[in-house]
Image (tube, grey):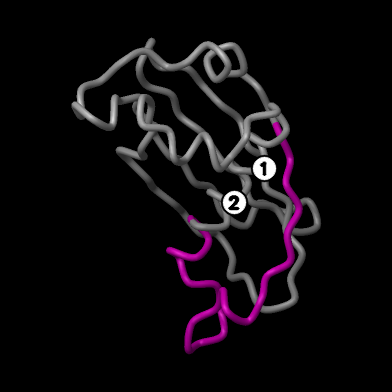
Amino acid sequence: MNKFTYQRKIYFADTDAAGVVYFANLLSICHESYEEYLTKLKINLPDFFRNNIIAIPIIHAEIDFFKPLFCGDLIMIDLSTKLINDKIFEISYKINQDNVLIASALTRHICINPQTRKTQEIPLIIKKNL
């Protein structure tokens, strides 16, 4: 299991009509932290996301909120990875503000060939960092 921390400010565009972060936007912010983690691994993101041999779509996502987040809040996302098998891995996200757990999320990813849509093994560059 690997860990990574991502810091981000909450923007007005992240909030809903009630002024709090919309749940889907926090999942999107979690995905930002995943992209930053991939960058830390020296993975070229344009090549990674446009690859015609390997794709790693999300097959499951969940999020739980414990406190609201507002525009201007500074959050830390602690990301940790877990290999499920040779084709599937999970990322858990702990969203904190001032060392208080605000929300937790999880995404499950599967490796496929985007041409055939059949599952395949996770590439070594990813697997060795899970």
- Identify the residue shown where x is 71% and y is 34%: 4
Query: Residue lying furthest right in this view?
Result: 98
Position of the C terminus by quadrant: top right
The label on residue 36 is: 1
Q: Are marks 1 and 2 in contact (CB under 8 Å)?
A: yes
Percent coordinates x, y for residue 74 in the rendering:
77, 64
- Identify the residue shown where x is 68% and y is 79%: 71
Side (left or right) of 92 relative to 109: right
Type of amino acid under label 2: Glu
- Where, by quadrant of the figure, is residue 10 drawn? bottom right
Position of the N terminus by quadrant: top right
Percent coordinates x, y for residue 34 in the rendering:
58, 41
- Identify the residue shown where x is 50% and y is 57%: 28
Verify whether residue 7 appears in magenta: yes
| Vertical order, 34 against 72 (above or below) | above
- Identify the residue shown where x is 57% and y is 79%: 13
Q: Pointer 2: what residue?
A: 32
Please state which of residues 49 and 29 is positioned toward the viewer in this rendering: 49
Q: What's the magenta region?
A: 4-27
